Image: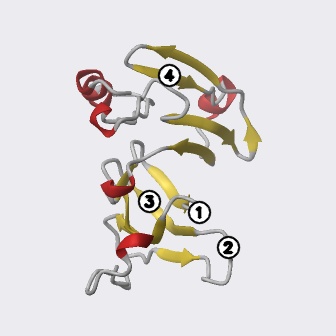
C-alpha cells in the first residue's frame, strides 16, 4: 500500500495480515502489480489460490491456509514468493516476520537491475547460527539468501543492502562481509 495511515493501522492490528508499504515519493504505486505482486503462496508444499483486490491506496492479496489446518493446530510450512520494484538508490529492503516462526529462509534474486553487490543482514535474536549463501560470480543469476532453523519472533527480520554496479568504481565503497 502507499498510504501510511492505512499501513500503520494494519501493522497494529493483531492477526495474520502482512503489510508492505511502498512510498509514493519513490515514483512507484502500491496499488499496482508493478509495485508489488504476490505470485505464489503454498502450505506444506501445496500451492493455494491467490485472490487480488485493488483500491486507490493499495491492493490486497488473500490466500487461505485452510480451516482443517488451522483446526489441527499443527506446525506447517508456509512459503510465498512476491515481486516488488524498489528505487535502486534506496539501497535497502526490510523483510519483517509478523508471526512466531520455526525456521526462516529468505532468498532474493536481483539480476538485471543494476545492483553490483547485495548482502543480507539478519535481525534474529538467538544463539543459533544463521546460514548465508550467495551465487558464485560465475553463475549469471544473482541470488543471496539466509537460512535459520530456530524460532524467529515477531519484529525480527532481514535487511537487504546493496551497492549499485555504477558505485563499485567509487574508491572505498564496498560491502563488507561479516560472519554471523
Q: Tell me which label, 1 or 2, sits earlier in the chain.
A: 1
Task: Between residue 13 and residue 24, name the one nearer to us.
Answer: 24
Q: Position of residue 69 (x, y in %)?
A: 66, 32
> Does the CB distance between marks 4 and 2 fall below 8 Å?
no
> Does the CB distance between marks 1 and 2 fall below 8 Å?
yes
Q: CA distance from mark 1 to mark 2?
A: 8 Å
The residue drawn where x is 50% and y is 26% is 32
Judge left or right: residue 2 versus residue 150: left
Up-down: is 36 above or below 127?
above
> Does the CB distance between marks 1 and 3 fall below 8 Å?
no
Q: Position of residue 56 (x, y in %)?
A: 41, 13
Quarter-of-image position of residue 139: bottom right
Task: Between residue 124 and residue 27, name the one nearer to us.
Answer: 27
Q: Tell me which label, 4 or 1, sits earlier in the chain.
A: 4
Q: Tell me which label, 4 or 2, sits earlier in the chain.
A: 4
Count up the numbered dots. 4
The residue drawn where x is 54% and y is 61% is 110
- Callout 1: helix, strand or loop? loop
Question: Which is more foreground, mark 4 or mark 1?
Answer: 1
Task: Between residue 48 and residue 23, name the one nearer to us.
Answer: 23
- Callout 2: helix, strand or loop? loop
**Which quarter shows the N terminus?**
top left
**Which quarter shows the C terminus?**
bottom left
> For mark 2, what is the residue?
140
Question: Which is more foreground, mark 4 or mark 3?
Answer: 4
> For mark 3, what is the residue?
151
Q: CA distance from mark 2 to mark 3?
A: 33 Å
- Callout 4: helix, strand or loop? strand
> Does the CB distance between marks 2 and 3 fall below 8 Å?
no
Residue 118 can be seen in this image: no
Q: Which mark is residue 111?
A: 1
Q: Position of residue 103 (x, y in %)?
A: 52, 60
Amino acid at each position: 500500500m502507499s498510504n501510511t495511515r492505512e499501513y500503520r493501522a494494519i501493522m497494529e492490528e493483531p492477526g495474520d495480515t502482512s503489510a508492505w508499504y511502498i512510498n509514493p515519493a519513490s515514483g512507484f504505486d502500491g496499488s499496482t502489480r508493478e509495485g508489488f505482486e504476490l505470485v505464489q503462496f503454498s502450505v506444506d508444499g501445496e500451492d493455494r489460490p491467490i485472490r487480488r483486490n485493488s483500491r486507490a491506496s493499495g491492493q490486497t492479496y488473500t490466500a487461505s491456509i485452510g480451516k482443517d489446518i488451522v483446526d489441527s493446530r499443527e506446525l506447517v510450512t508456509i512459503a510465498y514468493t512476491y515481486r516488488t520494484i524498489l528505487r535502486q538508490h534506496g539501497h535497502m529492503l526490510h523483510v519483517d516476520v509478523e508471526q512466531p516462526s520455526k525456521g526462516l529462509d529468505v532468498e532474493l534474486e536481483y539480476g538485471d537491475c543494476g545492483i553490483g553487490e547485495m548482502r543480507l543482514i539478519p535481525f534474529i535474536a538467538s544463539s543459533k547460527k544463521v546460514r548465508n549463501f550467495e551465487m558464485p560470480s560465475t553463475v549469471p543469476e544473482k541470488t543471496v539468501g539466509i537460512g535459520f532453523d530456530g524460532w524467529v519472533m515477531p519484529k525480527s527480520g532481514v535487511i537487504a543492502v546493496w551497492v549499485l554496479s555504477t558505485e563499485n568504481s567509487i574508491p572505498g565503497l564496498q560491502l563488507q562481509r561479516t560472519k554471523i
